Image: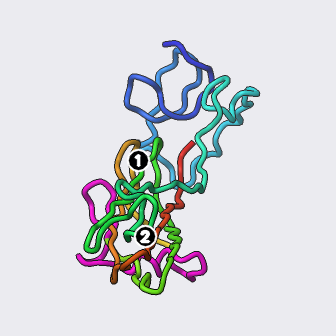
């Protein structure tokens, strides 16, 4: 088999993890319970080639970032009320804010920013969180999304299910009270989470 000598890890094509002494050497299984001493000898010294911190020559190792991701409103631009330009959603409407990460993404915080114009723009944003078809709450019902996602909120981190690439992360939202006349409310929603790159 082709390969790099002295590679510690998975030996391709065998389904066995072990130490490979050469490119064509057979793997040594790690799990031989009866033959393992209580305190085995230290592992052999390995002199790594200069590319070893990489997955392969020219390919950096897998890393993780903590990044923001916009959740875009699917309708009405995230606005409720007739006074907006263009006009926002009418009273009683639910607006879905959604995102489809391109790499595995695990949400750890929501940021929700309201813009309220007019004396009747008093409603708070409430709704439910989903990753794919899975509800991300301890019980059915509307959460106070506006308080949960406030920029100055303390200890409001979350740990949603990891979304694989292309899986929808959605917030279905509505208001506790709807603006009237020319008043309106507009919301932006962002998710912050762990992203593999």
Residue 100: mark in rendering: 1
Crowding near the residue tagged with mark 1, few <14, some 14–19, many ≥20 C-alpha atoms within 10 Å: many
Left/right of residue 43 with respect to residue 35 in the rendered view? right
Among the 4 quarters of the image, the one containing residue 20: top right
Residue lying at 37% horizontally and 42% vertically, measured from the top left: 166
162 up-or-down from 45: above or below = below
Residue lying at 43% horizontally and 70% vertically, measured from the top left: 83
169 up-or-down from 118: above or below = above
Residue that label 2 marks: 83
Q: x, y percentage for residue 9?
A: 53, 34
Q: x, y percentage for residue 38?
A: 51, 55
Element on which disc 1 rests: loop
**Pick the front one: 10 or 27:** 10
On whether residue 134 falls in the magenta region, the answer is yes
Q: Range of the magenta residues?
A: 128-156
**Pick the front one: 55 or 85:** 85
On whether residue 197 falls in the magenta region, the answer is no
Element on which disc 2 rests: loop
The residue furthest front is 181
Residue lying at 57% horizontally and 33% vertically, measured from the top left: 8
**Pick the front one: 129 or 9:** 129
115 up-or-down from 38: above or below = below
């Amino acid at each position: 088999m082709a390969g790099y000598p002295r590679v510690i890890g998975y030996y391709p094509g065998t389904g066995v993890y072990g130490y490979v002494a050469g490119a064509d050497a057979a793997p040594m299984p790690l799990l031989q319970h009866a033959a393992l001493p209580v305190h085995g000898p230290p592992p052999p010294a390995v002199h790594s080639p200069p590319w070893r911190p990489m997955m392969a020559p020219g390919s950096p190792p897998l890393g993780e970032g903590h990044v923001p991701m916009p959740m875009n409103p699917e309708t009405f631009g995230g606005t409720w009320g007739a006074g907006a330009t263009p006009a926002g959603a009418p009273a009683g409407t639910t607006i879905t804010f959604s995102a489809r990460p391109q790499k595995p993404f695990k949400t750890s915080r929501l940021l929700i920013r309201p813009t309220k114009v007019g004396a009747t723009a008093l409603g708070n944003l409430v709704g439910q969180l989903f990753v794919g078809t899975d509800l991300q709450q301890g019980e059915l019902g509307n959460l106070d999304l506006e308080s949960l996602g406030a920029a100055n909120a303390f200890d409001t981190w979350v740990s949603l299910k990891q979304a694989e690439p292309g899986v929808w992360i959605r917030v279905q939202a509505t208001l506790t009270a709807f603006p009237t006349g020319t008043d309106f409310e507009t919301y932006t929603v962002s998710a912050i989470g762990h992203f593999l790159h």
